[in-house]
Amino acid sequence: MKRCLILAFLLPLAMSRVGSLSSAPFPGENGEALLQQAVVQASSSIVRIETIGGLDIVEGELAGTGPTTGVIVASDGYIITSAYNFVANPASILVTLPDSDRRLPAEIVARDHHKQLTLLKVEATDLIPAVPVPMESVRVGQWAIAVGRTYAPKLPNVSLGLVSALERVNGKAIQTDAKVSPANYGGPLIDLQGRVLGILAPLSPQGKGLTDGMNWYDSGIGFAVPLEEILQRLEAMREGRDLHPGLLGISFSGDAAFLAKPIVQEVRPTSPAATAGLKSKDRILRVQGRATPSVAAVKQVLGRYYAGDVVELVLLREDQEVSTQVTLAEKLEPFHFGWLGIQLSREQSNTSGGVVIEYLFPDSSAEKAGLVKRDRLLEIDGRVVESAATLRDILLHRQSGQELPLKIAREGESREITVSLLPLPEAIPAELPLPIFREKDANQPPVETGEVPLQLEGQARICRLFIPEEYNPRDAHGCVMWLSGSGEPIPAPQFAEWKRLCRMRGIILLMPVAENLQPWSADDTAWLIECLNETRKRYTVDTERVCLVTAGQNPGYAWQLALEHREHFKGILALSVPDRIRLPMNEPGLRFQVLLADHSERGQKIVPRLSELLRKEGFPVARVEFEQELQSTDFDAMGRWLEILGSH
């Protein structure tokens, strides 16, 4: 049942929550009155915001046009709200003050790009600022009320819940199970005294965009940025200064962040970390005096800071503690991944150690250094190469131009070679050997192949798969998710070509079915990722050859899905390109490549500009040129590009 109601319905709502939350006793017999009093107390600081004009479609989704909410933070007319409320770039903004029918024009003063907030200013005086709750007094399990002012100018809509966690979304937010949605984005999360815990915003633990947190809508998870922390930055924003995330410029290993020890794997050249003297293999013990036993803990502490902030790090280096101060940066130099230019044998022997080179790309770093087919790579940059995964993890943190010492075995003899890494290729090779598939195990249980429906437990929705008839669990297959922006199925001629390519190159094709053939949106993200994960559980998938194909109109959502989930998708094959795109920072450990193949008149106008933007941020861009319809030779080129995704 929806729990976002007009104030007049607050009392039945409160009663409906009492029985199920024994961990947070309801506040006495007069609890209903207390709840109503808390909302009334806070209402004098809550405004209604309306926008006029702007974009209809933002990141592939219909932009909301209804009223939203803001919170007064200064008596002279300053209002804080969620940046989501202005994602459509409105032409004008109007604010209705509490207990007033008069709408005042507002202007944007500054933006907080880290916590997705916007500061507005109206010409008014003697306003009542919200009272913040001191963060040291906030407790998990305490009651909280999410408040908006969207349905009626003078009556707030409310939702009752609990504070369910603190310092979520990398330390930026309070988590609540009160209903958080566009109906109250920008409004306050308040306590039973009417004080403001935080400002409600659609934040996401993964993405960093204005709409990324929308996929948590209706999930029982909402986030609020602590008001106390917002007020600490208010003076800077009043001066018109935008706030940006603070970047350090280091990378860790690819292990799970909540388990891995925070041992620095790579320091970005010219980054704040490099300037402060951080080195590879340093372990971060404390950040700003707080212990950091894991990578997740480091991210949680650093997530509270902005570009320009100075933070103190305590490091463990060769059994000695080292202290240093770092000034966080707004931007880092783009990271350009280094590439050896080799493919490994899919059948590796564990008895001899190392990995065997099966193919060298022409004019690659490896070929220029004198490596040859069947060389066994034993060590790279002083690290033992135990498997293909080990090699990949090392190279994911090395930039083009770096020189690396290699130790190889050739015909029983050990040799040492130095290689200078080249950037990832943009040109698709004219030829590339087809993979050699191993014989099936006669004792292997039969596997369903061909067109196979995939249905997740407890879900009515279907994802169609195509599994090559000769699929062998002993061979790792590539994986391609085909996603049309408008939700239509894959055209029959293209499907036939994809099936041919799947058989030829060893690829599994995922074709999620959109509900009622509607355009994809952030609400679908969790299901799409789970379909991919379930495919990886059922079949042997090469996690480095996982790609998303965008097609049709409105491809913006598919692009953002792939870019914001580079831990899953290693590339995007674009049969259609978006009018606008927000690119993330190209980070070590998240190698990502782009193939542009949009032949439409509109696409041909966008592709040159998009290519330039992608390259500027460090993403390699390949092209497939054709005039009208994709031919078999074009699909063959796509197949060769997919092989590059899995190369080293």
Image: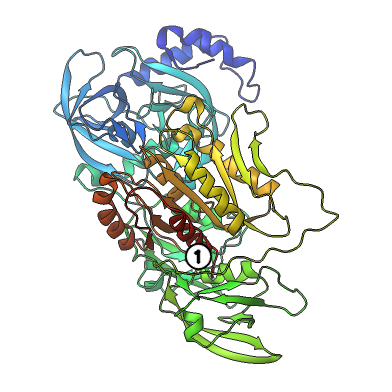
Name which quarter of the figure residue 487 lies in: top left
Indicate the position of residue 538 as horizontal and vertical percent values: 70, 46
Residue appearing at x 28%, y 37% in the figure:
118
**Who's the residue at 67% across and 68% down the image?**
346
Q: Is residue 265 above or below residue 260?
A: below
Residue bearing the label numbered 1: 644
Q: Does 216 appear above or below 308? A: above
Percent position of residue 248, x then y: 41, 62
Q: Nearer the viewer, residue 423 or 317?
A: 423
- Report the amino acid beneath label 1: Ile
Position of 307 relative to 275 (above/below): above
> Quick one: quadrant of the C terminus?
bottom right
Which is nearer the eye, 347 or 330? 347
Give the x, y percent position of residue 440.
Answer: 77, 58
Tell me, yes or no, if residue 223 can be seen here.
no
Give me the residue at 36% from left, 37% from top: 553
Q: Image height check: is 130 above or below 1?
A: below
The spot of residue 267 in percent (x, y) is: 45, 71
Camera-side residue of 100 and 640: 640
User: Within 10 Å of the Cα at label 1, are there few (<14), some (14-19), or many (20+) other Cα atoms?
Assistant: many
Quarter placement of the N terminus = top right
